[in-house]
Image (cartoon, rainbow, N blue to C red):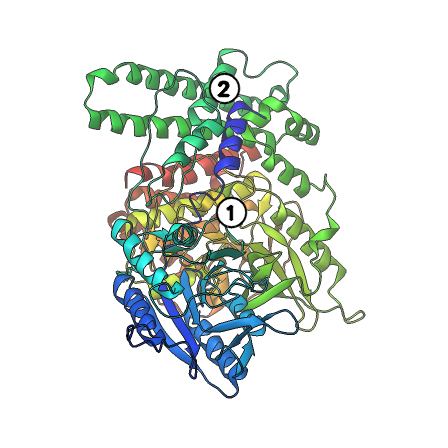
Amino acid sequence: MSLEENFIQQFEQSSQNYFSERIEYTSAKALLLYWKDHDLDAVEPTRPSATLSSELQALRVLLEQDLNFSTCTYEIPTEHSQQLLNVELSKFVAASSVEADTLTVIYYAGHCDSGKDGKARWSAQEVGGPDLSWHRTQRILDDAVGDVLLILDCCNAGQVSEPEKPLGKLELLAASGKKVLTPGPGPLSFTTLVTKMLRRLLRVDQEITVIHLHSRLAQSPMTTETPVYFDLARSHSRSITIRPLVTPKHTGFIQKPSSFILLKASLTDDPTGLQIAHWLKAFPPRNLLAVNIEAVVLKARNLQELHDTQAISPGSALSKLSPAAQSQILRELRGLHSVMADVESKARDDGHNTQSSQSLETSESYQSIESSISAVNNAVETGILIGAPNDVLKEAGRDKSIQAIAGVEAFNLREHILNLRPIPAELALPRGAVKLSGGNDRFQLGIYKQRKVVVEYFKYEEDPDSGMPHAQALEQLRRMTTLLHQPKKASYHILPCEGYIHEEVHRRFGLVFKLVENYNPARVPTSLSTLLKEVRKVPLGHRRRLALSLASALENLHRVGWVHKEYKSSNIFFLPDWPQPALTQVGEAQEQTSPTPCAPVSNVDLAFPWLFGFDYCRPESVESNRDADYGFENNVTRHPDRWNRPRVKFTKTHDVYSLGILLVEIAFWKNIASLLGSSNKPDDLEKFKIGILEKCRGDLPHQVGEVFLDVILACFNFGEATMKMSDFDAHRYLQVNIVNRIGSGISHI
């Protein structure tokens, strides 16, 4: 493990999820429960206000006026108590906790004791009267998608069941433990103490964790019995935070982090990641959403040492690459060396500059170093992955110096594509392993091994002899799932794949992709084709970032020899309400990148698209399907050689052409099939291509600039431009004239 990898690993292990698990609730609702015929009201004339109803009213005022929560009360009826409470609680949970960013508060005041089965039973009277099994009713809370806070003001309040809640938190704040009596309504009641303590704490701090509230209640001299706190659903290390609810402003754009800071620290020597983690966790500000630490300068210095010695030593894996590949690696190392020398020169001159100019220079220097490191990584990966013999590929995967530069994820992926590694059998998930929760014909959301997942389905044709999928289709599925399962850099824009499921009844397969923890499980992914129809105007900078993400994703696929085959807007999806920054939390292999600028539109972020539609993708070397397809809307996204009945095998050129069509859609922000108002007759396809080129040349320079137009034309002309080039040179053409060109100057938009 390299120095920078060890540094980052120490930091991440110590601070994992520490900053990112904070949730800003968009909805908070409380249900206050008590019995219709209870015996808790005080009868002493000296305390006429000491009634349950008055205490509930005081708590309700606090929740509604101080915290902006929605509240309602429910009197548990005397007859059919169990059934009617179950119905009421089910309705309340279904209405209040359908999304991950919601808080549901369930409050109960009454009696509680142990039943014959040793489980908690609520009752209206201390002796006799109606009762019900809270053990059975509590199970309803397991269905809540968001966080749930359970507050119990009763005897034996700590007697609760272990929940089976797969999503969100479930925390208990109770008046006492098992077999302990608690005061009734009055100045010492638990309800009164909670109301007063919350009001007192809110005067000092607008954010109060439940565990902190419990601590303050336990220390209060007014508390007669020690209150109980349990974290019943430990899906996160954080505690539920009680804070005033802020009504979101609907501006048509999603909320993004309001600021990023670049912290510059002068150190006498290199610290450890553990030291930095402890330092940042000591007193973090409340509004800190996330912290990513990147040993960028440390890695740059290591690469600089490689340049200063002998970057390509005789007999090494790099020395066995083509002359063009070696030349590119040395060129990028020299570029990094120049950048580091320039940064060191600026650092020596910092004392003569103003604070604002120092800040700007620091940010620019950081970006320059990061860009140079990425260029070295790409040069090494490209040289090894494209054109190098298989034995060099295997040697590179074991070479520690190469691993320090480029990592091994792409090399492992390439070996799977070349069938140099076996296909794991465990990727076929057992029946019922994925618990589905809803969606549409193409996507279903669900839970697999207590993690949120999205399942993408596609149909297959049965073998008439066996009634099962054709053997070739099943083999292709297993190979594809293996590739999707491999760790990848975030720039592939592919969610980690857990495996596949087979639904024989519906004659379909489902690819199971892992989602991030803070993804909203109530909303299925949104396609780019849908956004093109529903969102009218999108800033040019946002469109440029989307274009760069899609071009980079395709370049990464092609670098390892993987073609997508259906690279179009209906296969590009976004995760709604997914807070940024979170991209590096998804992949098992992570890139070291600075905070990527957001491109928020509607309830998605255009800077973070995800690729789907993998039922057709395959290694480039595998023979492709040449079945006829005369559908106009399908053909217009494909290379002319693949229209109607394909005449040639699918190649990378066809993917790049489809990327060009995607960029046309992004530039005009309109679906390609409707751009010229063309008819849906297959005979019009050739005219369609000519019309698109004319419209691009006529309108795009004014609308999106010459650079965007040049990139689109480079995509359309990729086949002709690279016809006589080697595979390495053709890929360099893709990197230089398409990916790098669309990304030029994007950080300044």
Give SS at disc 2: helix
Question: Which residue position is annotated with label 1?
Answer: 586
The residue type indicated by label 1 comes to Val
Quadrant housing the C terminus: top left
Going by the image, does 41 lie left or right of 420? Answer: left
Residue 421 placement (x, y as % from top left)? 72, 40
Distance CA(mark 2)–CA(mark 1) = 27 Å
Residue 382 placement (x, y as % from top left)? 55, 32
- Along the viewing direction, whichever of 562 and 268 lies nearer the viewer: 268
Residue 197 placement (x, y as % from top left)? 33, 56
Query: Residue 302 bears which disc, if any?
Result: 2
Residue 473 sits in quarter:
bottom right
The residue type indicated by label 2 comes to Asn
Quadrant housing the N terminus: top right
Q: Residue placed at 40% from the left, 61% from the top? A: 672
Going by the image, does 582 lie left or right of 395? Answer: left
Residue 431 sits in quarter:
bottom right
Q: Is residue 676 visible?
A: no
